[in-house]
Image (spheres, grey):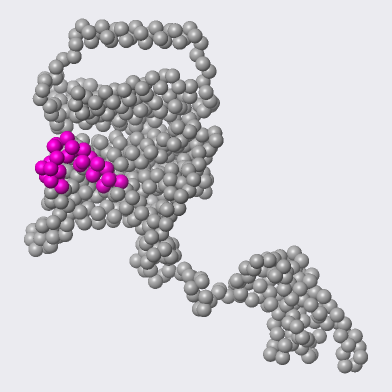
Amino acid sequence: MLSLENIINGIHTWLNNTFDPTLALTCEFVLLGITAIAIFAVLGLVLVLMERKVAAIMQIRKGPNRVGPFGMFQTVADTLKLIMKEGLTPDGADKVLFNLAPFIVMIAAMLLLAPIPFAKGVQMWDINIGVLFISAVSSISVIGILMAGWASNNKYSLLGAMRSGAQIVSYELSAGLSVITIVILTGSLQLSEIVNAQQNGWWIFKGHIPVLISFVTFIIAVTAETNRAPFDLAEAESELTAGFHTEYSGMKFALFFLAEYINIFIACAIGATLFLGGWMPFHIGNWEGFNAIMDYIPSSIWFVGKTFFLIFLMMWFRWTFPRLRVDQLLNLEWKYLLPISMLNLLVVTVMAIMGWYF
Amino acid sequence: MNTSDILFYCISAFILGTGVLAVTTGKIFRSAISLLFSLMGIAALYFWMALEFIAAVQIVIYVGGIVVLIIFSIFLTQKSGEEMPKPPLSKIWFSFFSVLVGFIFTYYLIHQYGFGNGGEQPFELKIADIGNQMLSLTGKGYILPFEVISILLLAALIGAIVVAMKIKNKSE
Amino acid sequence: MFITNYIKEIFNGVKSLLTGMRITGYYFVHPKEIITEQYPDNRATLKMANRFRGEVVMIHNENNEHACTGCSACELACPNGTIKIINKFDINAEGKKKKAIDTFVYHLELCTMCNLCVIACPTDTIKMDQTFEHSVFDRSQLTKVLNRPGSKIKAGVE
């Protein structure tokens, strides 16, 4: 059967048979880099269009519908426009840091792509500390945002960057705590093992109420960490024009914009991997026939489907809820999410020890 | 010299270069960013040694925690964007002297003891082993420091919650 | 109790969030609700809302007659000098001089569509029309004369 795993293994063996190992490894690195960039470009185009369409339909509008059928090439046109635009650097800006910041944000997003299992056997780097690696690297992007805000020499940018920093630092706590519940249940930080542990059922079903609670806190926390509405205080356009990327234009702005969507994708992919079983198909107990049909669907489709379901959920949040005030934002984290997730962690630990899950 | 050695020297040069930039630049924010890159280079060195756990912890604590706090405090100070005045000559001499002493001391230690040979076998590190070692009572276990740090962190978290949950006085 | 209040607060919060999400979710799965008018495409069938005001026009009947007596009530009512009435004196059948309208000058570029002139008109001769495609290359083209050439006042209107 033709699957992604077989194709990748085929390329790997062919390269190793044709060239010597070092050259083959270099070739694989180059191929991986190209794949990562291609994934980025395609994801950026698809997600921006999806966001605009979802937003439009939820607001009883039509959305982009002029460029191509159903406006499918709208984002391509937008990208072309952004490439043509001049990338301005303001006079009073710290030029080096100003130009460096978008790349930091982008590189952090790219690094996060490495440990995600996209399909059965398709994983760039099956690192043994997967979950920890993700929470470590995702904290680099906040540096890029702070850098952009400071280097722009603009008060809006600085305020936006500071808000974003405070927000990300505080919401990382509850995101981490809700991820730890799954780590406790699985007993491993490795993402491939977490997926394999969900062979006989996804954690959200196996772990019932406590895992459901941690799933909800995880979704809220990553929505805040990716600076999306209703937590988009960092770029609150009605207060701070565009927050930390006010001064950016052209391709440098596009990098920030792209990184935002890539971060959403990664956050949702991690959510899908931890709670919804990654590429594991949906199985119900002993229904052999049903399970066989589910197995027939390729694992990559399962992964992409779950991830896009979570992305849709985040878009649904964005176009339903109004933006929070700064004090409300911090109240939500410190008064509600953190105590709940700490208590939940305790409950999950007891559950894992007593074996009260399916 | 193989690829691995070349990588090592590249990472080391990066660490040293950004470290020198951190102390010589005139702008405080740039200095913090250089420090950040230097710390990330150290994390890269851990990755090079295939010690992923320590590398990730290095990034979480230093890059995600400490440097962000430093940058925050820089944001909150005035005149953070201005060039700092040149230090007086005596200060330059003094720092040069202390750097020299530190360098000689380190060099002396390395010269005397040398680097231990880690052996040819690649170093396998399981996360479960780290966890067991942290919680073991015997065989150089780290249960006491681990628990002390846990209690400290828990106290900090609960303290933060208590501060946040403080019920406002109705009369105010 | 503090704890029961806390739990109740969480419960109510989640419930109100879900209420909001239900409404947007309803619109998402019912694309028929879309109210977007794709304007240049549906020009032929475009129906404006009743209260929409596009410009002031003068009502003429099939005999090219209007009801304007030239009383200038609309000119006085206009808050920003959009309307200028120029009168002349007709000589009627009995040889008497009678005030009548010569030109009803309407500056569309100044008009705010406030509808005050229509309310002020004692003979209901002007009304708000729903046309809105007013773009021209020269602003002088926006100065219009509302009474048609050769039109005269309807018989019996004083």
Residue C82, image x, y percentages: 74, 68
Q: Give residue A342's quadrant in the image.
A: top left
- Residue drawn 42% across the image and 57% down it: A77
- Name the quadrant of the N terminus of chain A: bottom left
User: Which residues are drawn in magenta?
Assistant: A11-37
Q: Of residues B80 and A251, which is closer to you in this image?
A: A251
Residue B93, image x, y percentages: 44, 7
Q: Of residues A295 and A144, which is closer to you in this image?
A: A144
Question: Of all residues shown, which one is farthest toward the bottom?
Answer: C93
- Residue drawn 70% across the image and 70% down it: C141
- Residue drawn 40% across the image and 28% down it: B33
| In the rendered image, the vertical position of residue A14 relative to residue A141, given as above or below | below
Residue B32, image x, y percentages: 41, 26
Indicate whether residue C58 is drawn in magenta: no
Q: Of residues A185 and C78, which is closer to you in this image?
A: C78
Residue A76, image x, y percentages: 39, 56
- Residue drawn 64% across the image and 76% down it: C129
Q: Give residue A27's quadrant in the image.
A: top left
Q: Of residues B146 and A256, which is closer to you in this image?
A: A256
Q: Is residue C132 left or right of residue B10?
A: right
User: Magenta span: helix, strand or loop, mainly?
Assistant: helix
